[in-house]
Every structure is written in C-alpha cells, then in structure tokens.
Amino acid sequence: MLLAEAFLVLGQHREAVEFADEALARYPGNAEALEVRQAAREHLKACARAVRAG
C-alpha cells in the first residue's frame, strides 16, 4: 500500500495528493498512485464546491 493510499483512507486528501505526486515522480505511470491522486483530487474539488455553495 502506498503512503498516499493510507492518507486517502484517513481522509487527509491534500497529503494523499502530495505523496501520490511523489510516488509518480519516482515511478511515472504507477497505476495505484494515479488512482489515489485522482480520488483525492476529486474529493478536494467536491469539498471546494460544497464550501462555495454554502
């Protein structure tokens, strides 16, 4: 399991993106890191939309 995946499970989405990016810098194209980063980014975007909607 990637550290990024652990952060995702814990709900720490910014950290999940950060560590997924780090994993991708070392292992470009890593499917697990790409999935974790995408899921975390989607959650962050949804949170931002919810905050804007009030």
Image: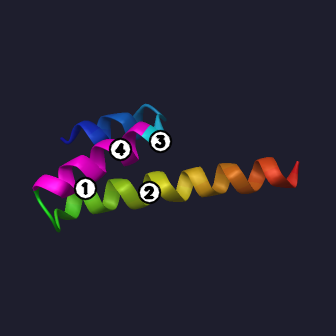
Amino acid marked by disc 3: His
| Of pointers 4 and 2, the one earlier in the residue sequence | 4
What secondary structure is marked by label 3? helix
What secondary structure is marked by label 1? helix
How crowded pointer 4 is (Cα within 10 Å; few <14, some 14-19, many 20+) is rated as some
Residue 18 inside the magenta-drawn segment: yes
Residue 14 in the image: x percent, y percent? 47, 41
Residue at the image position 67 percent from the left and 49 percent from the top: 47
Amino acid marked by disc 2: Ala
Q: CA distance from mark 2 to mark 3?
A: 9 Å
Residue 26 in the image: x percent, y percent? 11, 53
Point out the stretch of residues depicted in magenta: 15-26
Q: CA distance from mark 4 to mark 2?
A: 13 Å
Residue 32 in the image: x percent, y percent? 22, 57
Amino acid marked by disc 1: Ala
Residue 28: image quadrant is bottom left
Q: Which residue is mark 1?
A: 33
Q: CA distance from mark 3 to mark 1?
A: 13 Å
